[in-house]
Image (cartoon, rainbow, N blue to C red):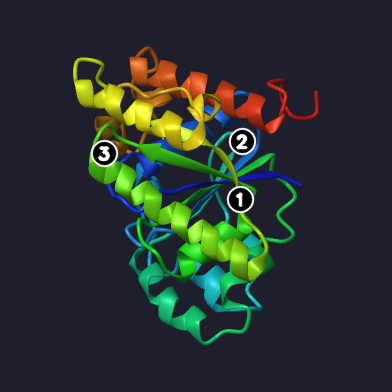
Amino acid sequence: MPVTIQIQNFKGGVGKTTTSINLAASLAGKGKKVLVVDLDHQGNTTKGLGYAVKDTTPTIFHVLKDIDFDFIGAVATVRENLDLIPSDSRTAGLEDILHSMPRREEMLKIKLAGASDWDVIILDCPPAHGLIHLNALLFAEYIIFPVTPEVWSYDGLEGVLGSIKRMQKYFNYKPTILGALPTIVDERYSLTDQVRDLLEQTFGKDKLLTPIRTDAKLKNSQKKGQTIFEFAPRSRAAEDYDRLADDVLRRVGLKKKARGK
């Protein structure tokens, strides 16, 4: 079965989408077959990968609202070794639809139970508590917390940790914390060190993932619908996300060699 990872923080603007796109792209470039599931109704991961959703395009909305819809019908190949289940504004309506369903917190787990064709599945999660968030918690084996060097970013992280505790109480399950991911890191500012110290106190030094340095090329790449490896392959952001992918592979026990070799 694939390694399943959710990218989560209740604070927006911390690099969830950027990480989902570029971690997935780096893993795909290392020969891993990757599926990205865009769970955010803003569809920024979908757009950031250059995939256009039309009115007739199957999305995660169709996967979760209809128990008889095979998720494979919504899978689009967007790069070599990289597939996507897209999202758009319709996904916002899932909260109401899921509310009336039995096992409403487990629909993602139920619908993607047969997703065995990939090495890694990455979930880009919305920055809010709700049924989609709970579905991600119950589906993913691992969780990565992107955190920027600001107090509000850490507060958003604390909200997710509280949610995990409640889910463990009621469902007897919680994802393994793969690590906290410092993003938009600028060593010139003392707050960067303060937030890093806070993360070490919360998770332990061994749970700090490879940091992502600030780089304007990241935003520009997403505007172009490109990964950082396509837009600026020699940038520090490309270097950082490539190192992060190696870090993730090591932590989840996957080898770097290509699938099937």
Q: Nearer the viewer, mark 1 or mark 3?
A: 1
> Residue 61: which disc?
none
Q: Can the viewer see residue 77 in this picture? A: yes
Q: Name the residue tied to disc 2.
A: 81
Crowdedness of circle 3 by 10 Å Cα count: few (<14), some, many (20+)?
some
Image coords of residue 242 (percent x, y): 49, 20
Residue 185 is at least partly visible in this image = no
Quick one: quadrant of the C terminus? top right
Mark 1 and mark 3 lie on one chain; the one further toward the N terminus is: 1
Secondary structure beneath label 1: loop
Q: Name the mark nearer the viewer: 1 or 2.
A: 1
On screen, residue 220 above or below 30: below
Read off the residue under disc 1: 175
Dot 3: what SS?
helix
User: From the viewer's perspective, is 126 left or right of 25?
Assistant: left
**Residue 140, percent across and down?**
61, 52
In the displayed structure, 260 sits above or below 186; it is below
Relative height, residue 20 to residue 169 (above, below): above
* Corner quadrant of residue 112: bottom right
Which one is earlier in the sequence, the residue at label 1 or at label 2? 2
Q: Position of residue 95 (x, y in %)?
A: 42, 76
What's the residue type where badge 1 is placed?
A: Pro
Q: CA distance from mark 1 to mark 2?
A: 25 Å
Instruction: Identify the residue position indicated by label 3 in the image.
Output: 223
